[in-house]
Amino acid sequence: MTGETDNACPVHLWNRAGILVLDKPRGPSSHQVAAWVGRMLGCQVGHAGTLDPQVSGILLVMLGNAVRLAPLLLKHDKEYICLMRLHGDVDKKRIEQIAVEFTGRLYQRPPRKSAVKRVLRIRTIHKLEILDSEGRLVLFRVQCDAGTYIRSLCHHMGLAMGTCAHMVELRRTRSGAFSEQEMHSLYDVQDACSAAKEGDRAPLSSMILSVDAAVPDLPTVIVRDTAIDAICRGAVLAGVGVISCDAFKKDQPVAVLSQKKEFICLGRALVPSSSFKPGATGLVIAPSTVFLRPGTYPRGWTKSCKEGKKGRKKSQAKEKKLDIKRDSIKKIPG
């Protein structure tokens, strides 16, 4: 597959924002896999939550301006299935006990091979479940904060059991709201691209998720059609443009949607939802990441007062020049 995608001419099969939940294989880096997808689809791509070359599983590939979601996607909790090898014999009850002890807040320092600064950090292990153990091999599932190093977790668990341990194999099975059920292989993407070139875009469209799938837990704000174009151009949303909204606090991130449930932008709440009513005056939401293109909806706003004043000043200046010319013509002796 590598040679085929590298030598193929770029095509443009996708030109909208979207998220592709990819099953990254062992071997290539996350950057390589995302680049292959970008070359197949002919669009800008990015990925969230880097996996080491020898780690497989869910890799979120952002298409088009969905790359603006990266700061949000990187904060998602993760779930992994890990195979760990102990360097000595340990009783199964002791292994279960250690799993309980390592649930909660832990200190971690990134491994020497990592690309980030090796400073001490705190990460939370939400759940650590021993699935099976045979001899010195231990299979477990872990749900944890973003940025948790499972390689370091295996090493520390081995030390706590009185023997060293190391990670043998790792697979990511969940990232935020995305699970293995939404996942597609590189071969699936390649087949869908081939079908799209022949005129059948249904397989490709079905596997690419809309950007609002990345923010299912955010409070939503539904706005009027007349306010959408102004938001797309960076204008702050006023209460008169709001139809309905969920409860939110000041400075909380919110998802702004159209009446058709189109994802317009991510925004920051300037006031709590309890302090205004939909349709009332006053600034409510400041857009931070806009996904809908300007011009998608007709303009429902007018030029500002400042622009009107400038126009009046220009017309007044022109009238003044004309008056001066008229006066000068009158003074010329006939």
Image (cartoon, rainbow, N blue to C red):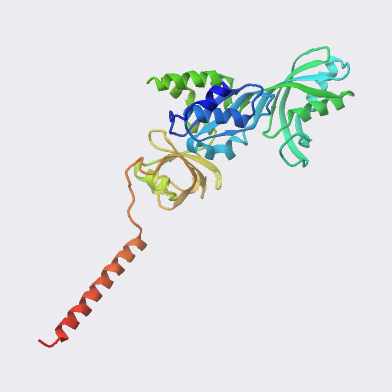
Vertical placement of 310 versus 125: above or below? below
Viewer-closest of 313 and 166: 166
The picture quadrant where one finds residue 88 is top right
Viewer-closest of 37 and 317: 37
Quarter of the image with the C terminus is: bottom left
Q: Residue 75, percent across and down?
A: 62, 36
Q: Report whether residue 18 is seen.
A: yes
Quarter of the image with the N terminus is: top right
Q: Residue furthest front?
A: 7
Which residue does the image show at 68% across and 33% down from the upper left? Answer: 145
Q: Residue 237, percent across and down?
A: 43, 48
Q: Is residue 68 left or right of residue 127?
A: left
Q: Is residue 42 left or right of residue 46?
A: left
Q: Report whether residue 201 is seen.
A: no
Q: Residue 246, percent across and down?
A: 48, 38
Which residue does the image show at 80% across and 15% down from the upper left? Answer: 137
Vertical placement of 158 versus 76: above or below? above
Q: Residue 80, percent across and down?
A: 68, 24
Viewer-closest of 216 and 111: 111
The picture quadrant where one finds residue 11 is top left
Q: Residue furthest left?
A: 334
Q: Is residue 242 left or right of residue 182?
A: left
Which residue does the image show at 68% across and 29% down from the upper left? Answer: 52
Q: Residue furthest top?
A: 134
Which residue does the image show at 48% across and 26% down from the upper left? Answer: 208
The picture quadrant where one finds residue 160 is top right
